Image (cartoon, rainbow, N blue to C red):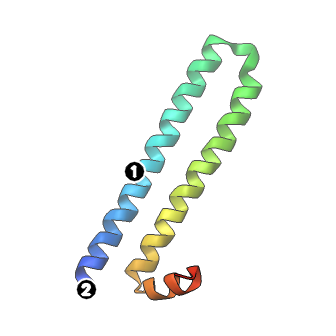
C-alpha cells in the first residue's frame, strides 16, 4: 500500500476523532447546563454524570488518535501482532 495514502488516512482519521470528541463533549455540556437550568437542585448529580461521560468520550477520542498515530508511524503490523490477529 502507498505510504502517502496511509499517512493521509491517518491524518484524516485523527482529525475526525478530534472533531467528533469536541462535538460530543460540547453537546454533553450543553445538555447538562440545560438540565441544571431546568432543575437546579439536581446540579450535583448532573455534574457528576457529565464529568464521567466526558471522560469516556475523551478516552475513545484518545484511542482513535493512538490508532491513527500507529498507522502514521507504520506500526500497523505491530498493532495487529499485539492484538493477536
**Label 1 crowd bin: few (<14), some (14–19), many (20+), radius 10 Å:** few
CA separation in Å, label 2 and label 1: 27 Å
Q: Residue at x 50, y 82 (%)?
A: 80
Disc number placed over residue 1 in the picture, else none: 2
Tally the numbered discs. 2
Q: Nearer the viewer, residue 82 or 46?
A: 82
- Residue 45 percent coordinates (x, y): 75, 27
- Residue 40 percent coordinates (x, y): 70, 14
Disc number placed over residue 48 in the picture, else none: none
Q: Secondary structure at mark 1?
A: helix
Q: Nearer the viewer, mark 2 or mark 1?
A: 2
Q: Nearer the viewer, residue 82 or 38?
A: 82
Q: Indicate the quadrant containing the N terminus: top left, top right, bottom left or bottom right.
A: bottom left
Horizontal side of residue 2 vs 64, given as left or right:
left
- Quarter of the image where one finds residue 50: top right
In the displayed structure, 35 sits above or below 59; it is above
The extreme top residue here reads 38
Q: Residue at x 49, y 37 (%)?
A: 26
Q: Nearer the viewer, residue 26 or 59?
A: 59
Which residue was labeled with disc 1? 19
Amino acid at each position: 500500500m502507498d505510504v502517502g495514502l496511509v499517512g493521509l488516512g491517518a491524518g484524516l482519521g485523527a482529525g475526525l476523532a478530534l472533531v467528533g470528541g469536541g462535538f460530543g463533549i460540547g453537546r454533553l455540556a450543553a445538555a447538562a447546563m440545560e438540565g441544571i437550568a431546568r432543575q437546579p437542585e439536581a446540579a450535583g448529580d448532573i455534574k457528576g454524570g457529565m464529568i464521567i461521560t466526558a471522560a469516556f468520550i475523551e478516552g475513545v477520542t484518545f484511542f482513535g488518535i493512538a490508532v491513527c498515530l500507529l498507522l502514521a508511524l507504520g506500526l500497523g503490523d505491530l498493532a495487529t501482532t499485539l492484538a493477536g490477529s
